[in-house]
Image (cartoon, rainbow, N blue to C red):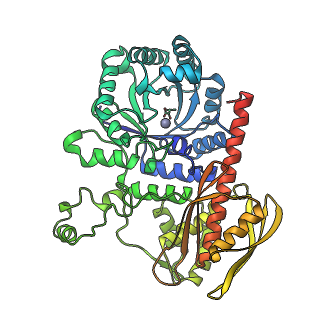
Amino acid sequence: MDRVYIFDTTLRDGEQAPGFSMTTEEKLQMALQLAKLGVDVIEAGFAAASKGDFEAVSLIAKEVKGPVICSLARALEKDIELAGKALECAERKRIHTFIATSEIHMKYKLRMEPEEVLQRAKRAVEYARRFTDDVEFSCEDATRSQREFLYRVIETAIKAGATVINIPDTVGYTVPEEFADLIEGIRNNVPNIDKAIISVHCHDDLGMAVANSLMAVKHGARQVECTINGIGERAGNASLEEIVMALKVRKDFFGNLHTNVNTKELYRTSRLLCRITGSFVQPNKAVVGDNAFAHESGIHQHGVLANPLTYEIMSPDDVGFPSTRIVLGKHSGRHALKSKLREMGFEFSEEDIDRIFEKFKALADKKKEVYEEDIEALVYEEFLKHEEDEPIKVFHYQVQTGDKLLPTATVVLSFRGEERTASSTGNGPVDAIIRAIQKALGIEPKLLDFSIKALTPNTDAQAESRLVIELDGVRASGRGVDVDIIKASVSGFVDALNRAIVRKSYILSKESLRREGTI
Ligand code: KIV
Ligand code: ZN
């Protein structure tokens, strides 16, 4: 009764957001870490959306043990069938089917009458039950749906066999008191509601996703759908780490309500997602931001030293925030690297660890101290990237600069196997090489954000570039790391371009499937 189930949708709703697309291998790494974190359900993707989504759901279903593995499916037989197929190997599986129930969605998006929607919901749940006993049904845009109709749809879905009823605030429109009232209304007006778990799925358009989810839990919801770092469509979803820590820290308010999450894995999971997507949380992000436990002012520092509870409502240790930085070096062995990788949330086979160890030794020879950030970068650069994710490859470049020289750069690269060369001048060496790359590719993406910083102290530090670009309406972020700042900028820029291009073809393939009526 007091257990709150955590349904993680980082790999589905989260991955859907611009700049957060992940490869199948990256999704698997994330899913393995989510299992370690102790989430109850992993929504691994939307199997019918693309071949890539299908493969990712299948792989996660096969490899990840512990949590229930779930696929999203529209209320269509072909979607549900693909979800069922992708989940075949799962130890425990769930199909999550949905249809919109608000007037605006039914009229303009579905072009369906409410009675048709009701029948579709019924048939979808019944069909999904052929593949698994664990079926979740969502009334999309529930918070803008007419109440009486919503109650009827929920009752029908439960009769048809739904075991979880999800109430999404699809457009992030509701406020805590109103949402609590909706959950109470469902509990009091749907006669068979005791046969299903009430779930909530809140978006953050007005910044209230976490507050709305918590109020729903207080009023009887027992599953929360959320994402790591709050990523998701538009302004994102409710942030998993904030929900979990609020329930833990405010026991005085929430009573015995609790989750099964191992909170010490929260920071690691957040970092892994940042690394994989190249998109980092803001320093003041609750629970996992770099400054979440930093005390700057003298008064605060004095208070915390006297007693941490003066200014800390939770300890960094509770969320696995690193208090000391363990540094590896050229004398560190394979064993030390292996335990460091595990501590950082990466799961690799012995063979893969051998591969990473070789790269680590090469880096340790160049650089005295190897920090966690260096290892993260190395794993990403050397291991998580795949041929098909890199349509652009840089072979060489050359940059000339100086106080009396006009910065000039030349690059030789290939685009989908075709070699190209170009040169350009610029306002500085980085500008010159970025212009040369653009010229070679014949594209001019908008550079929305660009920063470069030293990852660790000392002048031999690795430099890290982070960029956000927009190419043909597709946004993507990129990251590059190297001891040479020009090289770090080049790899960050090319990383962002590759992500934008891969994402663009993924969107195009989805669009053509949609035109064919496949999805
Ligand atoms: O926001 C939403 O309504 C969704 C549903 C598919 C659950 O993501
Ligand atoms: Zn959503």
Q: Please name the residue shown 66% across and 25% down the image.
A: 78
> Whole-percent x and y of residue 488?
60, 72
Q: Please name the residue shown 19% across and 60% down the image.
A: 309
Work out whether residue 121 or residue 470 is closer to the camera in this orientation and state it.
470
Relative to 285, residue 433 above or below: below
Work out whether residue 471 or residue 304 is closer to the camera in this orientation and state it.
471
> Whole-percent x and y of residue 94?
52, 32
Quadrant containing the N terminus is top left
Left or right, 338 with reference to 258: right
Q: Residue furthest right?
A: 418
Q: Please name the residue shown 45% across and 55% down the image.
A: 269
Picture quadrant of residue 422: bottom right
Quadrant containing the C terminus is top right
> Whole-percent x and y of residue 402?
64, 87
> Whole-percent x and y of residue 324?
36, 72
Picture quadrant of residue 61: top right
Residue 164: tell me if it is visible.
Answer: no
Relative to 343, residue 188 above or below: above
Work out whether residue 109 or residue 514 is closer to the camera in this orientation and state it.
109
Left or right, 51 with reference to 416: left
Picture quadrant of residue 213: top left
Residue 153: tell me if it is visible.
Answer: yes
Relative to 148, residue 137 above or below: below
Q: Residue furthest bottom?
A: 404
